[in-house]
Image (cartoon, helix red, strand yellow):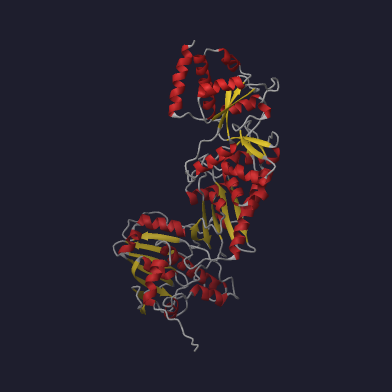
């Protein structure tokens, strides 16, 4: 037998759920209550604009009053206010949104949803996360309306009576519980207001009961006209830099920025800054603040801001975001993906524009922006396809080249991961009019592999991975060097060391060490990830003896003990040119150096 019924909700059981689980952070209650006050002001302004209400000429404002003795926190606005019936309707019905009803009622008469945040009818109850009791004093804008008072301790009961308010608007008086006493601290309160309400569209004033008043002009604690609301053409460089400092308290000026200003197919405004990187080896994390109608939502929401863009700093205000009830996360929606793609496109367009129109400036930015660009390419191949022609590669000769201009030897590009550690190899290249690119950042370990995947006809090799044909001497023909190889093998007694002999163009270098490129890359990746793949085996080393070097030529004629000492010393010098010596290696090097000097 089929039956239908109505689900019943017990408010007594619902309140604890709202208080504990609705919002991820307790301090969000302040955003919700102040946002409701903003909505009340916006509603009144909308009614005035269509002639449904008479403008009283009083400047819109929200007052936040902290009374430590009474243990109360009050949020008061001079917005639309409520009648007895409206309090009964909007406050006592959980999940009934007065803002949503207002938008539906006036949608044909004006842009009623302009700036109105509330849509779920639950924000008011966030006050109970920090309050034992909450009171409301309200007076509607309507003529002859009577003030109303409402009070509840968060149980399933409430009291409603005549109020005492004499001016239109609403006051929410929160009697703070022991669990919420941290919000009775003025410093804590100011930090929360700065976090959530710094750019709200109605002026907010904070006062502390009992505090000594200073004889100075009253100033709002928020900025109701953030720079992202202005047209880009109306903004000056100084304004962009000042806004950056104000928002991120970063004294290092940004390199450049992108001003987003979209009205179709969705509404989106914001400013993204390219910060100066202070660490040349590690990517410094950025901070993208997400807003909806100037109300702060969260930082770095990955559904809206692609992961690689989170290396930037900026603000994005998008009223069309499909927020969930707590406004901390997004509901799944196809529009979110479109917003994310649009932001990525605008970033790519800006980079291309700077490259084409300000090439010298672009080159000066490169060390700071290259980690961001490379990370973006690895994370989003479409981003790479769009900007690959403006990716720069700095050479050991301090020139900037694009991929098509890279110095190649038989379709192979040589690179340097440390100009200091690989200085000997760099010198060999420069002495022979050869060039290589500099890839010193940690992300370059991944980026090199990514480039080989995308540009499969080109291979990359670190400058110490092999001796290319260009460095081999073309004056001396290769012959049988087994004798010198045998001498070094016997002297060094290094079982895992491969030894070869080759005439090199740089005759004053007795020997060099090369590393297996594949093994070294795997070792570097494992090190970056904290050896998560286990302790890496030693990277294969090859000692290449330069048969054109005068010292090497004399080794076979030396006495055996001196011969072994010179071979060891040559190996030490080759090691020093390739990497830092271990403590044992350094101790042996110093001991042998003394013995070499004793030969004088």
Q: In this rendered view, identify the residue nearer to me: 127 or 220.
A: 127
Looking at the image, which residue is at 44% across and 19% down? 591
Residue at far left of view: 69
Count of picture labels: 0
**Where is residue 59 shown, x and y percent of the image?**
48, 65
Q: Is residue 360 left or right of residue 178?
A: right
**Where is residue 210 shown, x and y percent of the image?**
31, 59
Above or below, 257 relative to 198: above
User: Would residue 509 be seen by someone viewing this image from the given angle?
Assistant: no
Q: In this rendered view, identify the residue nearer to me: 179 or 98.
A: 179
Looking at the image, which residue is at 56% across and 43% down? 443
Above or below, 143 relative to 546: below
**Where is residue 85 shown, x and y percent of the image?**
43, 81
Q: In this rendered view, identify the residue nearer to me: 235 or 127.
A: 127
Looking at the image, which residue is at 39% across and 70% down? 17
Q: Is residue 281 left or right of residue 454?
A: left
Residue at far bottom of view: 1
């Amino acid at each position: 037998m089929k039956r239908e019924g109505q689900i019943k909700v017990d408010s007594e059981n619902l309140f604890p759920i709202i208080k504990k689980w609705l919002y991820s952070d307790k301090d969000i209650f302040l955003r919700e209550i102040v946002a409701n006050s903003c909505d009340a002001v916006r509603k009144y302004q909308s009614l005035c604009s269509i002639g449904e209400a008479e403008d009283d000429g009083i400047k819109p404002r929200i007052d936040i009053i902290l009374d430590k003795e009474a243990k109360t926190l009050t949020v008061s606005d001079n917005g639309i206010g409520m009648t007895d019936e409206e309090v009964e309707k909007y406050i006592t019905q959980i999940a009934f949104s007065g803002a949503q009803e207002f938008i539906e009622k006036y949608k044909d008469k004006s842009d009623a949803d302009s700036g109105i945040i509330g849509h779920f009818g639950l924000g008011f109850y966030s006050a109970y996360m920090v309050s034992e009791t909450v009171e409301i004093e309200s007076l509607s804008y309507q003529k002859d309306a009577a003030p109303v008072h409402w009070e509840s301790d968060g149980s399933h009961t409430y009291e409603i009576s005549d109020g005492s308010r004499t001016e239109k608007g609403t006051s929410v008086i929160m009697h703070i519980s022991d669990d919420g006493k941290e919000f009775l601290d003025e410093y804590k309160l100011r930090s929360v207001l700065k976090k959530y309400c710094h750019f709200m569209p109605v002026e907010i004033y904070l006062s502390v009961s009992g505090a000594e008043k200073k004889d100075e002009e009253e100033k709002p604690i928020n900025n109701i006209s953030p720079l992202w609301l202005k047209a880009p053409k109306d903004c000056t460089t100084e304004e962009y830099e000042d806004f950056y400092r104000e928002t991120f308290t970063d004294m290092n000026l940004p390199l450049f920025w992108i001003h987003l200003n979209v009205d179709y197919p969705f509404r989106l405004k914001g400013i993204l800054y390219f910060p100066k990187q202070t660490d040349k080896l590690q990517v410094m994390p950025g901070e993208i603040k997400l807003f909806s109608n100037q109300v702060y939502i969260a930082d770095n929401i990955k559904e809206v801001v692609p992961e690689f863009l989170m290396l930037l700093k900026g603000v994005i205000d998008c009223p069309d975001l499909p927020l969930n009830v707590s406004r901390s996360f997004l509901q799944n929606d196809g529009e979110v993906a479109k917003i994310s793609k649009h932001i990525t496109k605008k970033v790519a367009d800006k980079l291309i524009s700077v490259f084409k129109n300000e090439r010298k400036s672009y080159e000066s930015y490169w060390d700071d922006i290259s980690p961001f660009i490379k990370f973006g390419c690895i994370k989003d191949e479409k981003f790479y396809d769009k900007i690959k022609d403006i990716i720069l590669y700095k050479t050991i000769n301090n020139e900037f080249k694009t991929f098509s201009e890279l110095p190649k030897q038989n379709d192979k590009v040589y690179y340097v991961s440390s100009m200091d550690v690989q200085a000997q190899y760099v010198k060999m290249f420069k002495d022979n009019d050869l060039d290589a690119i500099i890839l010193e950042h940690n992300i370059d370990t991944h980026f090199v592999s990514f480039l080989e995947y995308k540009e499969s006809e080109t291979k990359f090799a670190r400058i110490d991975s092999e001796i290319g044909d260009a460095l081999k001497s073309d004056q001396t023909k290769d012959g049988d060097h087994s004798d010198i190889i045998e001498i070094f093998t016997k002297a060094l007694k290094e079982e895992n060391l491969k030894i070869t002999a080759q005439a090199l163009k740089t005759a004053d270098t007795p020997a060099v060490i090369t590393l297996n490129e594949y093994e070294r890359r795997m070792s570097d990746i494992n090190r970056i990830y904290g050896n998560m793949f286990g302790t890496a085996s030693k990277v294969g080393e090859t000692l290449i003896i330069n048969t054109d070097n005068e010292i090497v030529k004399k080794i076979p004629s030396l006495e055996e003990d001196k011969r072994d000492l010179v071979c060891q010393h040559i190996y030490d010098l080759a090691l020093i040119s390739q990497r830092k010596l271990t403590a044992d290696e350094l101790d042996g090097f110093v001991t042998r150096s003394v013995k070499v000097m004793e030969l004088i």
